[in-house]
Amino acid sequence: MNNAIMQIIFTFGEAIRRGTPLLLGTTGEILNEKSGSLNLGVEGTMAVGAITGALLGLATSSMFLALLGAFVGGMFCGLIYAFLTITLKANQNVTGLAITIFGSGLCLFLGETLKSTNKFPAYTTEFFNAMTSGGIPLLKDIPYIGTLLFSYNALVYIAIVIALIVWFYITKTKSGLRMRAAGENPAAADSVGINVDAERYKNIIIGSGIMGLGGVYMALFINNGLWNTDWISGYGWIAVALVIFANWSSARAIWGSYFFGLLLALKSRMPSLASAFPSILSWTTEIPTELFDALPFIVTILVLAISSMKKNKKTGSPAGLGLNYFREER
Amino acid sequence: MKKKITVLLTVLVMLVASIGVMAAFTGCTDTENEFKVGVLHINPVTSTSGYTYAHQQGIVYAQTELGLKDSQILIKDNLPDDQTDQINAAIEELIAEGCNMIIGTSFGYMEEMQNYAKQYPEIIFSHGTGYLDTYGEGQNNNMNNYFGRIYQVRYLSGLVAGLTTKTNNIGYVVARGTDTAECTSGVNAFALGVQAVNPEAKVHVMILNSWYDLVNERGYADTLIESYNCDVVTQHCDTNGPSASAKEHNVYSIGYNSDMALAVADKGVERDPSVLTSVLWNWGAYYKPAIETAMKCFDENGNFVSIDAWKEFDNYYGDYTDGLYKLAPLSENCAEGTAEIVALVEEIMAKGTDDWDVFTNTALSFVKGEDGKYSVVRSQRQLMDNEGNAINDVTVANITGEMPYWVAGVEVHNK
């Protein structure tokens, strides 16, 4: 039985580890969307954060510099997106897709170039041990609960804190109200003296920085800091859908991300669950693994379909989402 | 207006940059009468580990050994093997550029290559890992397929794993299941190697159903180590994920395709000791004689003479004696006696598959003599699959063969 409980805990642990980059991507995207910008560049922004953060972190063996590099890399993508859509009034969707292509390409270019010239910073066990086997001292030694709740790397907890801060900022603070106004009805916001462009710039750039953190998590913890040609592997796109799943609330995004993390973890963890609970779950070994690959995307489609059918008016979707604001056409 | 100028400027900058890059890469020289080889790769040719890297190393080896100029080797890389249009375009470009021989390194190029081989009897085609060719009565005889008995080295790596494991649980992350003989023959040979030295040990298999699944290649290894108590994991997939996972969990791994001891090594350490060894291809052992032979079908002006010389490469299925593959250097963490036992089997393999092969009813075991030296004992056995049925067709899985079973001692955890 102990073994069976451990299998469940391992599965949840994997769900939390896989859900964390989704949470960071989603939180960043919520800041973008709440201020009125439908930024489809999450995948690319995460890729840039991943490469800048990983290069800095691996080269200096510093967790702080890894996070800083990722945040700045993400902000850089956010700046491009904001400049194109707000100042130059380019179409938001097309610009977002361009950021995705640009970011993924830049990541690939830097990684491949450094790798082919043997200049890609090496993997260091010390650096990873400091972060991964860390957990919270003392608490992580509690049987079961310690492994379940306190045994993760620092970024898992940082992600939760960021999501809660963003939730507080959006729903409880005055400046959060201003940015929501810029997203809901920019013309009205403008008429009461809110600088719509500044609000959007600010939130896009900070939101993109948070996405960058999600990227460096993918690079360092999901891919162990080893160069691979597709570090983000579609997580950015799941994050875009998760915003709708979480109804534009970063607090709801926490469990939403872990739920999708669980869906992603099932492919590798289901067999061990099946051997721990043969009487209930043995049928799952007959499921083709391709179905597990498709599962997060099937659920994404279901979520989008169900949420669009809901007649409930209390959706968190900002009314001005995806629309550029032309002051002159007010 | 400003916007238009910005857009125009951007486009202009991009144009200038791309023309510059193109000019740098295509130094135009007069190369009309040379023998030219075209190569199709699935991943970027700049890869520093993995599948394309291993093939490209082989091409470079052949080029150096045969003294070919860079202008004689034309490469189309980053070519997805499910995109018929792109594959056709790449082959047509190579033909237009005057290639006398076209080598395709990925399975998916097979049908397109066969089509062009039928149209162009004066060009030699060589396709790796597939099963189509153009040999036979009334055909052009200009396209072969090539592969190797890589399972022989899998057997050797099984010896290493079986000797080193302490928990007697060994993990294997594999790309595909019983529908792909390349995978099952690898797992089965590995398991037979394990059993030759450690009959107690079990091989736990998890199937990815994908040739490239970055996140799960690592995730599967995590599961094998955490949930199935494996202390050695090996893999038949494309990334270094399983080796990275093993290293993080303080257990051992065995790599494939490229030397994973280099891929997961720490700063300042040349080879990572957690990687016991890797199963490596040495494609140069095929590309050198193949290109050399293909050249014999043309005169010095690059004109086609006759296809006769090329016929010897029909269904090329290289083995240990060709040097087509090998084990990477053994780690210091391998159990005592590993190197001697591996060397004994290598000696047997060097005699060729007529003497002994993995999938036969002759088992090998190893006895330590009083002088501390090991010797090989051969004995008869009945090969069994993991459902308890006798395996009677033990003919070696050849290039077009099937192997729709797992041998006894293999436990498969998913479909």
Image (cartoon, helix red, strand yellow):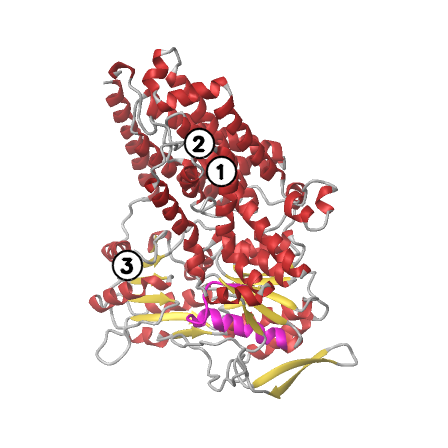
- Residue receiving disc 3: B99
On whether residue B188 falls in the magenta region, the answer is yes
Classify A69 as above or below B174. above
Left or right of residue B295: residue A4? right
Give the CA separation, mark 2 to mark 3: 54 Å
Q: Chain of mark 3?
A: B
Asked if marks 2 and 3 touch (Cβ < 8 Å), the reply is: no
Q: Which residue is mark 1?
A: A253
Instruction: Give SS at disc 2.
Output: helix
Rendered image quadrant of residue B172: bottom right
Looking at the picture, how far across and down is residue A14, in whole percent? 57, 50
Q: CA distance from mark 1 to mark 2?
A: 9 Å
**Quadrant location of residue A78?**
top left
Q: Quadrant of the C terminus of chain A?
A: top left
Residue at the right extreme, as displayed: B370
Residue for badge 2: A30
Query: Which residue lies most toward the front here?
Result: A312
Image location (x, y in percent) of residue A93: 32, 33
Residue type at the position of mark 2:
Ile
Give the chain letter at badge 1.
A
The location of residue A125, given as percent across then percent down, is 65, 46
- Name which residue type carries label 1: Ala
Q: Residues within 10 Å of mark 3 (few under 14, many from 20)?
A: many
Q: In the image, what residue occupies the spot 31% across and 39% down? A: B23
Q: Which residues are magenta?
A: B173-195
